[in-house]
Image (tube, rainbow, N blue to C red):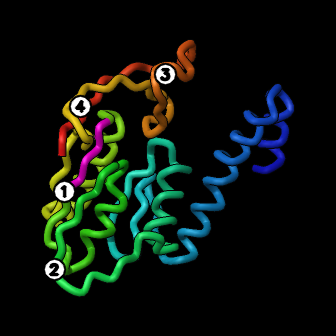
Amino acid sequence: MKILVNLLCCFVPLKKWRKGIRRRLLGIKSRRKKLMAHGFKIENEIVTTPEGVKIDASNVPHEAMGITKEVFLKKDYAVNFSSDAVLIDIGLNRSIASLYFATYPNIIKIYAFEPFKPTFELAKKNLELNPQLSKKINAFNFGLGRDNAINTSRLSQSRPMSFTSNSFLAGNTNRFLENTTIVWW
């Protein structure tokens, strides 16, 4: 695989692009291998954690597996809740962190917010894969802010979790505009 990736990179002019290709193609394999070595199962692009949480990795798998590794394997989000708690997840993303916290018995409710529709759709897929945990999670397709507003952002068609302001990458045809609702909190 590494030889094929290096051969492919011979035809890519920019070093930054070659680095991205190597990271995506070889990174997926190493992340997959590392997760499986720690008791994760991967079948038909669905990652199942040792806790039984299912994560859809079919869209941009290196990102999905990276977030899954960060949250479930490295335990970067591990918090010790000594009593019942309600959690607010601002930036639901794929809902991986919300699902992780929903495994905690003393998390009684999670309110999760994701302003970007394509990313929210990825989160909904993961919530649907985990109906028992999803009962604890109320997911909303809007952001939270100081004032009510409609913001316009550029989103990548190939990477729905990548966004930027209007002025940046204005001529990039791989991006599309999306209006997002921000609600005063």
**Residue of label 1:** 111
Residue 181 numbered tag: 4
Q: Residues within 10 Å of mark 2 (few under 14, many from 20)?
A: few
3 and 2 marks in contact (CB < 8 Å): no
Query: In the image, 61: left or right of 109?
Result: right
Q: Nearer the viewer, mark 1 or mark 3?
A: 1
Numbered range of the magenta stretch: 111-115
At x 23%, y 31%, the residue is 181
Residue type, numbered disc 4 = Thr
Q: Which of marks 3 and 4 is in front?
A: 4
Q: Residues within 10 Å of mark 1 (few under 14, many from 20)?
A: some
**Residue of label 3:** 175
Residue 179 numbered tag: none
Residue 36: percent from left, percent from top: 54, 70
Q: How crowded is mark 3: few (under 14 residues within 10 Å), some or many (20 or more)?
A: many
Residue type, numbered disc 1 = Tyr
Quarter-of-image position of residue 108? bottom left
Residues at marks 2 and 4, CA–CA distance in whole angstroms: 31 Å
Furthest residue toward front: 146
**Residue of label 2:** 84
Residue 177: percent from left, percent from top: 39, 20
Q: Which of marks 2 and 4 is nearer the N terminus?
A: 2
The answer, for residue 131, to whether it is visible in the render is no
Residue type, numbered disc 3 = Arg
The answer, for residue 59, to whether it is visible in the render is yes
| Disc 2 element | loop
Quarter-of-image position of residue 121? top left
| Disc 3 element | strand
Q: Earlier in the sequence, mark 1 or mark 3?
A: 1
In the foreground, 174 or 27? 174
